[in-house]
Image (cartoon, rainbow, N blue to C red):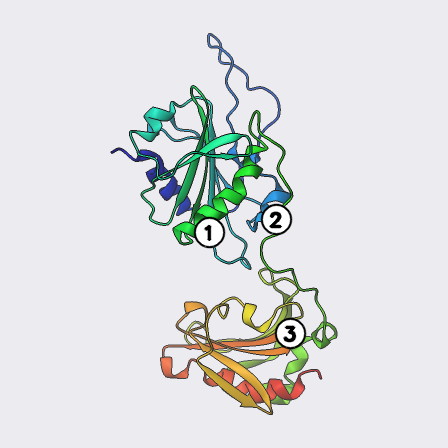
Amino acid sequence: MRMKWQVVVALAALTVVSGCTVAVSGSAAPVPGQGPIAKAMDACTLLDEAQLDALGYEAKGRSVEENKERLQTPMCLWNTKDDVEPSAILNVGYTTDIDFNEYIAGAVPKSGPQQIAGFTWTQYPSIIGDDCVMYAILGDKSFAYVSVSEPPLEKACEMAKVTIPRVAAHLPGGQDAPSITPTGPAKAEPGGPLLSVDPCTMLKPEQVAQLPGIKPEGEKDNSSAVPNASYCLWDDTDGDQGQKAFEVWFGPSTPVTEWPGAKGVPATETLDVGGKKWGLFPNMGGLRATCGATLAITETSSVQVVSGFIGDDTKTCDLVKKGLPLVTANLPG
């Protein structure tokens, strides 16, 4: 059985990046002697930003153009947002110029037809083990599909079926999409004692002097990855090898279990520092030379301390452990 259609999807899914192709208004100019040039279909238009947000996906996806020689429909792929579980890849495709029977190449349906949002949708097999892909035939050479990959198959199919009515609403003859309860927990609003404190005040000059290989002045910055978070970085003095910089992070809307690198990972050790319980994470985020420690301030806010050592795995957490008593003494509240 030739399963070319999902080979293409699998390769595209492995290279998902932000940045949906932008459709250009107007008509393309024909080449002299040829007919009008058909405007390329952008499958990213089959879901709008509000729908993607409610479904738990990032607002921008990756648009992949049609390739008839490979029997590849126009498609768009989206990743789930960082705070949504389970993580998944959503793939939506739609064509008006590929024969479905040729495309499917004899594949046998995995489920009976289901009526969803005004169309008949049928699940077909995929070469990706936990990929649930459902198709709707719309015309002689027109069909659409919705595919969800990465969660267990049963969960992937649940997620696909929730997405289908939203896609169908953008297809010719589709029904209006029903409202949807947003996926994932509500975003915590920044609050608590961390809001009014500069993370660079967590080490006084005489305390920084107790940390070997660290420069005396810290530099504050805002995080581009963690909402509302800021940090202070005291740089190291020995270049690319040995001791690494010492960082104190404030997350006024980040629960202690939500820091990147610590999310879903149990602490290897709990350190009692002045009555405060810090969780220790050697090799934080899978980085061999990085160590982190996290502390809850409130239910929805927390502090993170990060450092590391390159060249000697036995020293990875040394500076973090040495700095925790100094930082803890200066924490608000």
**Picture quadrant where residue 186 is located:** bottom right
Residue 115 lies left or right of residue 253; in this view the side is left
Looking at the picture, tell me which residue is in the foreground, 92 or 162: 162
- Return the disc, 1 or 3, that comes first in the chain's sequence: 1
Residue 243 in sight in this render: no
Residue type indicated by callout 1 = Ala
Residue 333 locus on image (x, y percent): 71, 84
Q: Which residue is mark 1?
A: 88
Residue 291 in sight in this render: yes
Q: In 3D space, how far apart are the residues under numbered discs 1 and 3 (Cα atoms)?
A: 27 Å
Toward the top, the furthest residue is 33
Q: Residue at x 59, y 33 (%)?
A: 169
Q: Which residue is mark 2?
A: 54
Residue 211 lies left or right of residue 299; in this view the side is left
Looking at the picture, tell me which residue is in the foreground, 244 or 112: 112
Residue 15 locus on image (x, y percent): 41, 46
Looking at the picture, tell me which residue is in the foreground, 46 or 204: 46
Q: In 3D space, how far apart are the residues under numbered discs 2 and 1 (Cα atoms)?
A: 15 Å
Image height of 285 relative to 276, above or below: above
